Image (cartoon, rainbow, N blue to C red):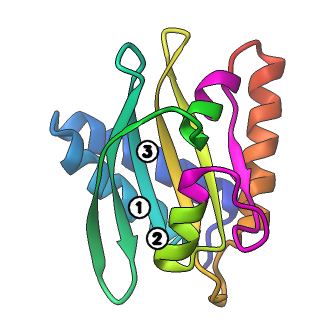
Amino acid sequence: MSCGPRSQRYRLLANLGRLINDSLDVRQVFGRAAEEVHQLLGCDRVSLVLVEPQDRTRRGFAVEFGDRAREVEIPVQTLADSAAEWVLANRQARIARHLDQARPFAEDRKLHARGAYRAYVYLPLVCRDGVVGIWGLATQPRRRAGRLGPGALARAVERAGNRSRQCGRV
């Protein structure tokens, strides 16, 4: 018997809660969480960008899923003119559906050139009314049967963002 989308989302949230409680090592928690998200959504890259607003910098790490999972270090970079800066300023998700057509930010150009990613979603991580980081999901051009594409993912993020704004918090 197959589980419905609500059941899958609940299971993902429960698993992520357990992962966070099991370890204080950010990289370990992130790696396990990225695998869970990859399994559920079928995204090809999951990233976590941590922001240092006082230094106007960002850094982080990602897991790229191909034949096998591969960890990627995101070195310290400036926030200036980046999609990360836009997410921080607007406190809302940035959805880039067609990186091959419009790439206004450095991340857009890097993701498209590097792995030929076609789309990504950057979600702000809010803590105590401030954005502390960004959770990113990206997909590659190839279409996998039974996987969630960027359009459906973007629509889900937009619905969640609309609900959050209605409650007064993003």
Q: CA distance from mark 1 to mark 2?
A: 5 Å
Tell whether label 2 touches label 1 (CB within 8 Å).
yes
Quadrant showing the N terminus: bottom right
The structure residue drawn at horizontal position 46% and vertical position 66%, both measured from the top left corner, is 45
Residue 138: which quarter of the image?
Answer: bottom right
Circle 3 sits in a helix, a strand or a loop, which is it? helix
The structure residue drawn at horizontal position 67% and vertical position 72%, both measured from the top left corner, is 148
Tell whether label 2 touches label 3 (CB within 8 Å).
no
Q: Nearer the viewer, residue 98 or 12?
A: 98
Q: Nearer the viewer, mark 1 or mark 3?
A: 1
The 10 Å Cα crowd at callout 2, few under 14, some 14 to 19, many 20 or more, is few
Circle 2 sits in a helix, a strand or a loop, which is it? helix
Quadrant showing the C terminus: top right
Q: Which mark is residue 36?
A: 1
The 10 Å Cα crowd at callout 1, few under 14, some 14 to 19, many 20 or more, is some
Residue beneath disc 3 = 14
**Where residue 69 appears, x then y in whole percent?**
30, 75
Residue beneath disc 2 = 39
Magenta residues (range): 87-108
Circle 1 sits in a helix, a strand or a loop, which is it? helix
> Which tag, 1 or 3, sits closer to the chain's start?
3
Amino acid at circle 1: Glu
